């Protein structure tokens, strides 16, 4: 039988029977690549022809009350911050995808975690398609990895890696990276969408079938999507992203999907000469270089996952020398900044026409939650009026189009973090304060209802 050929878009995974210059699904140009569909797999032991059938081995349905949660143990990687993003440790049989730009520290983190895990739990297989055993070991020496049952395998063939997994029966498998491995069943090059999808599927079988937790490393392209993109996210149990700027020493690992824990959970690390060091108190790190007493700087209490975090929001407003004013935001949605500037002009009487406005979340953090609105508005107003905000004041709150300050979730958590970091005053949505409450944890709570009220309280 002639092998079937399909053309697969490398951007979105859409398949077409013939080559086209442009994907009809996502509109990407020149993204279709020829792939051969694999020969049907030989019949599995049970006489079924579908190789996927081995996944559903559990048989009959169970009563809700009879499902025993005590089976759901968590295995610690020995790195607190990494355990935290995983939702409390590695779940046996889970498949985790760790994505990030090249050079951000994925291999370093996983090698450190692998060494700990091998020492505490059991043997670990670290399969790398990128580096030789020598290279991995010389990195390990720098990280101070001693004698542990850590097996290194420099291999790119998935079937070979699976053989080693079957032979060693490790407690954890790491595959670095999913874009460098290939299956002999496919003709296409490693890193193509068919190979990446096959790799994820095969390792999923291994993880579920033998109850071995597996971590796949995935490289991210410049535009932020996993190369061999979204096809992996729904296959794996947990998707973690490594964020941070190469020029800053700190790194953030964020869970964007987790079947076993809170999504958007955050782990903070610092890259040092001897590997990644967990940062137990990230607020301290993010505020460490804050210039107090300068206009245009505000402190925001945000919450990422279950973790409160204080970050500095900076704004700079300057007269535009060229015709059209520039509006720029780093670490925050640009459109939202434009919206907030419009609210400031209309509802608080600030004139920004003809001014360049720059907004920056200090330390390379990126923030999505609308609770940051108030701090952005405050930082911009502070810069426009050239008056600094009180150094001991923190804030949070969403800003609506009518200039109202809206309540946000988890206010208590934010206040506690501010108090712990030595702030004495928190400006926040009035609707988040219980009647009669004006002090919490040593922090004065100032409830505000409108942008105007907030600016009166903040810029005295
Ligand atoms: P790496 O883990 O190789 O990145 P990835 O696997 O995500 O591509 O990290 C490489 C970078 O980390 C490299 O630029 C050097 C830096 N680094 C340190 O600063 N300290 C260290 O101890 C190690 C091992 C790496
Ligand atoms: Mg690497």
Image: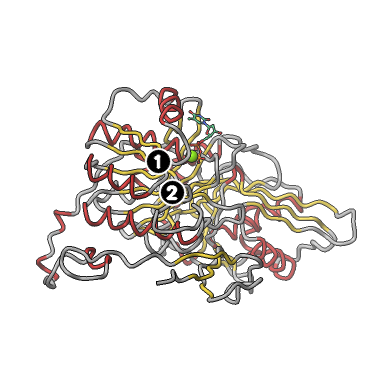
Task: Pick whichever, 8 or 99, lies toward us.
Answer: 8
Q: Is residue 13 above or below residue 141?
A: below
At which x and y percent is residue 364? Answer: 59, 45
Could you tell me how many numbered marks the image carries?
2
Q: Is residue 460 visible?
A: no
The residue singled out by tag 2 in the image is 181
Task: Pick whichever, 38 or 355, lies toward us.
Answer: 38
The residue singled out by tag 1 in the image is 155
Label of residue 445 in the image? none
Left or right: 91 in relation to 215: left
Q: Is residue 295 above or below residue 435?
A: above
Left or right: 397 in relation to 114: right
At a point 42% along the width and 37% down the height, the residue shown is 109
Disc 1 on helix, strand or loop? Answer: loop
Task: Pick whichever, 199 or 252, lies toward us.
Answer: 199
Q: Is mark 1 within 8 Å of ligand 2?
A: no
At a point 13% along the width and 64% down the height, the residue shown is 67
Q: How far separated are the C-alphas under marks 2 and 1?
A: 8 Å
Q: Is residue 31 above or below residue 367?
A: below
At which x and y percent is residue 107? Answer: 45, 38
Task: Pick whichever, 261 or 226, lies toward us.
Answer: 226
Q: How is the image coloured?
A: secondary structure
- Specify the farthest residue to the left: 66
Instruction: Pick whichever of labels 2 and 1 is earlier in the sequence.
Output: 1
Q: Quadrant of the N terminus?
A: bottom left
Disc 2 on helix, strand or loop? Answer: loop
At which x and y percent is residue 449? Answer: 56, 67
At which x and y percent is residue 428? Answer: 52, 58
At a point 83% along the width and 60% down the height, the residue shown is 325
Disc 2 + disc 1, Cβ < 8 Å: yes
Q: Is residue 362 visible?
A: yes
Location of residue 327 by image quarter: bottom right
């Amino acid at each position: 039988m002639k092998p079937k050929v399909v053309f697969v878009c490398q951007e979105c995974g859409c398949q077409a029977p013939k080559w086209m210059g442009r994907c009809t699904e996502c509109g990407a140009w020149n993204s279709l690549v020829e792939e051969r569909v694999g020969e049907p797999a030989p019949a599995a032991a049970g006489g079924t022809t579908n190789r996927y059938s081995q996944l559903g081995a559990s048989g009959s349905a169970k009563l809700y009350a009879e499902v025993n949660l005590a089976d759901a143990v968590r295995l610690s990687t020995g790195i607190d911050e990494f355990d935290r993003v995983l939702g409390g440790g590695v779940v046996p049989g889970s498949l985790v995808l760790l994505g990030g730009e090249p050079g951000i520290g994925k291999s370093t983190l996983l090698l450190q975690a692998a060494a700990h895990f091998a020492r505490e739990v059991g043997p670990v297989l670290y399969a790398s398609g990128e580096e030789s055993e020598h290279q991995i070991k010389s990195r390990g020496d720098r990280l101070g990895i001693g004698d542990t049952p850590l097996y290194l395998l420099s291999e790119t063939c998935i079937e070979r890696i699976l053989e080693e997994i079957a032979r060693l029966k490790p407690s954890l498998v790491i595959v670095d990276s999913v874009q460098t491995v290939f299956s002999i069943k496919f003709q296409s090059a490693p890193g193509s969408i068919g190979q990446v999808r096959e790799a994820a599927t095969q390792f999923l079988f291994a993880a579920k079938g033998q109850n071995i937790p597996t971590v796949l490393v995935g490289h991210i392209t410049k535009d932020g999507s996993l190369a061999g993109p979204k096809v992996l996210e729904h296959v794996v149990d947990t998707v973690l992203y490594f964020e941070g700027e190469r020029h800053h020493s700190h790194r953030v690992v964020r869970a964007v999907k987790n079947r076993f824990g809170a999504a958007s959970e955050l782990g903070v690390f610092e890259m040092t000469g001897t590997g990644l060091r967990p940062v137990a108190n990230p607020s301290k790190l993010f505020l460490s270089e804050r210039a107090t007493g300068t206009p245009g700087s505000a402190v925001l209490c945000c919450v990422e996952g279950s973790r409160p975090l204080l970050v500095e929001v900076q704004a700079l407003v300057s007269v535009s020398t060229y015709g059209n004013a520039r509006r720029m935001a780093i670490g925050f949605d640009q459109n939202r900044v434009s919206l907030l500037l419009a609210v400031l002009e209309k509802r608080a009487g600030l004139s920004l026409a003809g001014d360049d406005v720059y907004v920056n979340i200090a330390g390379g953090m990126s923030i999505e939650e609308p609770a940051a609105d108030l701090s952005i508005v405050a930082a911009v107003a502070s810069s426009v009026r050239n008056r600094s905000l009180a150094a001991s004041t923190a804030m949070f709150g969403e800003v609506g189009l009518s200039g109202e300050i809206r309540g946000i979730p988890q206010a208590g958590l934010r206040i506690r973090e501010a108090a712990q970091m030595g702030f004495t005053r928190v400006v926040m949505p009035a609707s988040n304060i219980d009647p009669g409450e004006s002090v919490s944890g040593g922090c004065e709570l100032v409830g505000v209802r409108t942008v105007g009220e907030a600016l009166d309280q903040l810029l005295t």
